[in-house]
Amino acid sequence: KAPYGLEANTSDANNTFFERSLASNTFGAVGAERGLGLSLAYNTDKLNAAVGVFGGAEGITRNATTRDEPYGVNARITFDPILDTGRVVHVGASAYHVSHFGNKALTLSDRPNVRVDGGTLFSVPLTNVQSGDYLGAEGALVFGPFSVQGEYGTLKLDRLGALASLEFAGFNIFGSVFLTGETRSFKGGNVDKLKPFSDFDPANGKWGAVELAARYDEIDLTDPA
């Protein structure tokens, strides 16, 4: 799994929402996700860094006419200056460079955050794409049962010849509170699993962990070029 973003590198079971944000999915499909590669990592309790070289993401389609796949370099670094039970300050940054797109084409697309069918929220086909560069920032604060988390990222796509480069951006921010008093935790630069204070057993007045969360999610795929 390529180093890339907080939501993307956190396990599905530990993310607050069922679906990752629009920008995390869309930009990740260009130069992150899972792929064959080699990576190196440096990890301490509070500082975590990783860099790697990877082939095309698992979403890349190859056929008889477009046999090649992209390849690129991914990196991510995170620092948690405060990392205690019930108190966390997390900051981080990610970047990648990807090139050699098969047939020089790609499509930026994603489904809605609430996925009740197979439809896409948007689909932007692009041609003559030579390479892509991503830069993103992430942050999170945890204070007892309250937490705030967000990410911002930009993607620049260079095109062949005299065609102008394209730049896109997206971000999300969310807040949450555990009504039952639990707290979110971080480990290794990612969100760690939650440990409820009690089991889910309504017959005996036990409701497990109850969390309320709201997210604002935005992606901008327009460019005057």
Image (cartoon, helix red, strand yellow):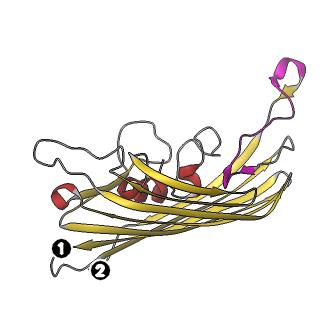
Q: Residue at x 43, y 55 (%)?
A: 28
Q: Looking at the image, can residue 25 be seen?
A: yes
Q: Please determine whether, in this image, residue 59 is positioned above or below residue 88.
A: above
Give the percent coordinates (x, y) of residue 2: 47, 52
Q: In this image, 101 relative to 183: left or right?
A: left
- Of badges 2 and 1, the one in the foreground is 1
Q: Secondary structure at mark 2?
A: loop
Residue 188, magenta (yes or no): yes
Q: In this image, 106 relative to 174: left or right?
A: left
Give the percent coordinates (x, y) of residue 34: 43, 45
Q: Residue at x 60, y 48 (%)?
A: 10
Q: Looking at the image, can residue 123 be seen?
A: no
Q: Which residues are magenta?
A: 186-204
User: Where is residue 172, by image quadrant?
Assistant: bottom right
Q: Nearer the viewer, residue 62 or 45?
A: 45
- What kind of residue is marked 2? Pro
Give the percent coordinates (x, y) of residue 77: 60, 64
Give the percent coordinates (x, y) of residue 82: 81, 63
Q: Which residue lies under the disc numbered 2?
A: 224
Q: In this image, 161 relative to 142: left or right?
A: left
- What kind of residue is marked 1? Leu
Q: Residue furthest top?
A: 203
Q: Nearer the viewer, residue 126 or 89?
A: 89
Residue 13, magenta (yes or no): no
Q: CA distance from mark 2 to mark 1?
A: 17 Å
Q: Which residue lies under the disc numbered 1?
A: 160
Q: Please determine whether, in this image, residue 142 is positioned above or below residue 135.
A: above
- Quarter of the picture holding the C terminus: bottom left
Q: Earlier in the sequence, mark 2 or mark 1?
A: 1
Q: Residue at x 23, y 80 (%)?
A: 164
Q: In this image, 80 relative to 105: left or right?
A: right
